[in-house]
Image: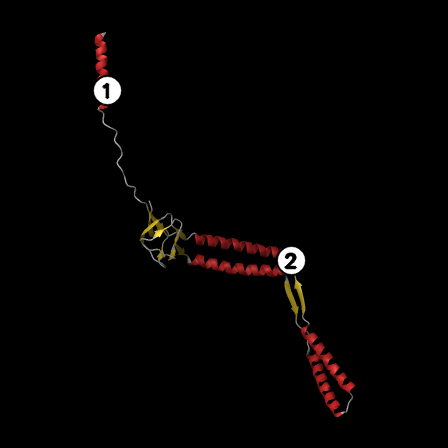
């Protein structure tokens, strides 16, 4: 019994000794995280526009870096803008109604009447000065002139003006044209904005590989940004 107890004691002591001499757990070595380098590529094929950044310049996240000009898309936006303006003007005209104006009546006869009345009035005034006619006769000639002149003025200004309203169907149809053009223009402008390249991070420009007005292909690297740690 004593022998077994001695053997157990020796075994336990050996185990404790070996455990104390075991190698310590290795700790991972300190590593330095490398800052990410972002390639900023052309979102479409075309000419580079608005690239004013310089190497070493600090850039904020989402800051516009440049845009790609697409002549066909730019022309489409311009054309749609013109068509929309004309369609909206036509819609307004239909909503307000069409103004119809008739030309003034022919005043030739009235002009001749005024000329004759002027001559008569002048002659009567001349005779009145000589005492050949009475004052009442001269005044009557003057009244005739005034009346003839008034008739001529009234005829010259007598334009017939009327407003012809458009039908509800015509207005509705033109409104649909306007709405369609607005949608097409919004889609074209959205595509145009999609050709702008914003910065994906805050960092520093480390390389510029293109310049303004340079023709580039979609996916071509335009510049590189080193992200701030």
Q: Nearer the viewer, residue 94 or 4?
A: 4
Circle 2 or circle 1, nearest the eye:
1
Tags 2 and 1 touching, CB below 8 Å:
no
Q: What residue is shown with label 1?
A: 16
| Residue 18 appears in the rendering | yes
- Label 1 crowding class (10 Å Cα cut-off): few <14, some 14-19, many 20+? few
Q: Please name the residue shown 58% across and 55% down the image.
A: 175
Q: Nearer the viewer, residue 132 or 91?
A: 132
Q: Nearer the viewer, residue 203 or 164?
A: 203
The disc, 2 or 1, on the residue closer to the chain's N-terminal end is: 1
* Relative to 151, residue 220 above or below: above
In the rendered structure, the answer to whether residue 111 lies left or right of residue 39 reads right
SS at mark 1?
helix
What mark, if any, has residue 218 been given in the picture? none
Q: Please name the residue shown 48% across and 52% down the image.
A: 187
Q: Please name the residue shown 74% across and 90% down the image.
A: 129
**Residue 126, image x, y percentages:** 72, 90
In the rendered structure, the answer to whether residue 103 lies left or right of residue 26 reads right
In the rendered image, the residue lying farthest to the top is: 1
* Relative to 182, residue 150 above or below: below
In the rendered structure, the answer to whether residue 225 lies left or right of residue 187 reads left
**Residue 62, image x, y percentages:** 40, 49
| Residue 221 appears in the rendering | no
Quarter placement of the C terminus: top left
Q: What residue is shown with label 2?
A: 167
**Residue 29, image x, y percentages:** 26, 36
Whole-Å distance between the Cαs marked 2 and 1? 104 Å
**Residue 146, image x, y percentages:** 72, 80
Q: Please name the residue shown 64% across and 56% down the image.
A: 168
């Amino acid at each position: 019994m004593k022998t077994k107890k001695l053997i157990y004691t020796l075994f336990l002591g050996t185990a404790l000794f070996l455990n104390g001499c075991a190698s310590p757990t290795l700790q991972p070595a300190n590593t330095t995280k490398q800052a990410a380098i972002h390639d900023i590529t052309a979102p479409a094929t075309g000419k580079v526009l608005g690239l004013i950044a310089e190497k070493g310049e600090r850039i904020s996240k989402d800051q516009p870096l440049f845009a790609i000009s697409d002549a066909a898309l730019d022309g489409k936006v311009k054309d749609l803008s013109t068509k929309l303006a004309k369609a909206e003007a036509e819609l307004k005209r239909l909503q307000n109604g069409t103004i119809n104006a008739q030309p003034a009546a022919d005043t030739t006869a009235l002009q001749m009447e005024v000329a004759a009345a002027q001559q008569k009035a002048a002659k009567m005034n001349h005779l009145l000065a000589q005492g050949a006619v009475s004052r009442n006769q001269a005044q009557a000639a003057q009244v005739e002139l005034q009346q003839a002149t008034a008739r001529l003025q009234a005829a010259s200004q007598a334009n017939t003006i009327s407003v012809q309203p458009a039908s509800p169907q015509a207005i509705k149809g033109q409104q649909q044209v306007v709405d369609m053009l607005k949608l097409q223009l919004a889609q074209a402008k959205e595509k145009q904005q999609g050709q702008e390249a914003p910065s994906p991070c805050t960092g520093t420009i480390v390389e510029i590989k293109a310049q303004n007005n340079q023709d580039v292909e979609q996916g071509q690297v335009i510049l590189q940004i080193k992200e701030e740690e």
